[in-house]
Amino acid sequence: VVTRGQIHRADQLPGLVAVANSEPVGLVTYIIRNGDCEIVTLDSLQAGKGIGSSLVAQVRAIAEDNHCARLWLITTNDNTDALCFYQKIGFELAAIHRGAIVESRKLKPQIPQTGNGGIPIRDEIELEIRTL
Ligand SMILES: CC(C)(COP(=O)(O)OP(=O)(O)OC[C@H]1O[C@@H](n2cnc3c(N)ncnc32)[C@H](O)[C@@H]1OP(=O)(O)O)[C@@H](O)C(=O)NCCC(=O)NCCS
């Protein structure tokens, strides 16, 4: 995953797995650095059951325990579902990094040109919750 020009190996980050009926149904990975906590990946395998929001709540608690100033993340301009979801659960828009995905493709050429709904993937949208 590339966010703000930084390559993250999600399989090497701390994370939390949501489990239902002994089956994994969700995964969040995050990184704490520079006094902030970044959600790097979030995936819920069963939409609308509270899995995504409970994983975020757990990471928020970890961020607060570690005295992070904010919990933040990057999503892309095409990911309207994520934009709805994160704002619904309390995140605010912090920045739009226009054209950032053009730069990310230089690090990760397999990032597709178009995403959800056939929207060209161009920009990073930064969302945050202040935790201090
Ligand atoms: C975004 C995602 C993590 C949401 O997970 P989820 O388990 O469906 O989320 P929850 O059930 O906890 O939803 C929490 C709230 O957000 C709302 N919500 C979720 N997706 C929404 C959407 N697309 N539009 C509007 N509201 C949405 C839910 O209705 C719920 O509201 P409620 O509390 O009033 O019922 C999931 O859709 C997903 O894995 N998407 C693909 C990967 C991705 O885009 N990850 C994020 C990018 S980093």
Image (cartoon, rainbow, N blue to C red):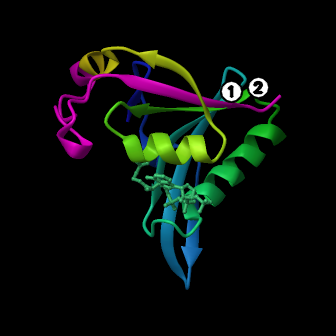
Viewer-proximal residue among 58 and 130: 130
Point 83% across, 28% down: residue: 132
Point 45% across, 18% down: residue: 96
Three-letter residue code for mark 1: Asp
Q: How many other residues sit within 10 Å of disc 1, few (<14), some (14-19) or many (≥20)?
A: some
* Residue 121 position by quadrant: top left
Residue hosting label 2 = 69
State whether residue 70 is above or below residue 90: above
Q: Which residues are magenta?
A: 105-132
Residue hosting label 1 = 36
* Residue 32 position by quadrant: top right
Viewer-proximal residue among 92 and 6: 92
Instruction: Say whether residue 125 is magenta.
Output: yes
Viewer-proximal residue among 108 and 39: 39
Point 80% across, 39% down: residue: 64
Tell whether 84 sits left or right of 114.
Answer: right
Secondary element type, mark 1: strand
Q: Does the residue at mark 1 contact the one at mark 2 (Cβ under 8 Å)?
A: yes
Please state the horizontal and vertical placement of residue 47, each as a whole percent of the image: 45, 66
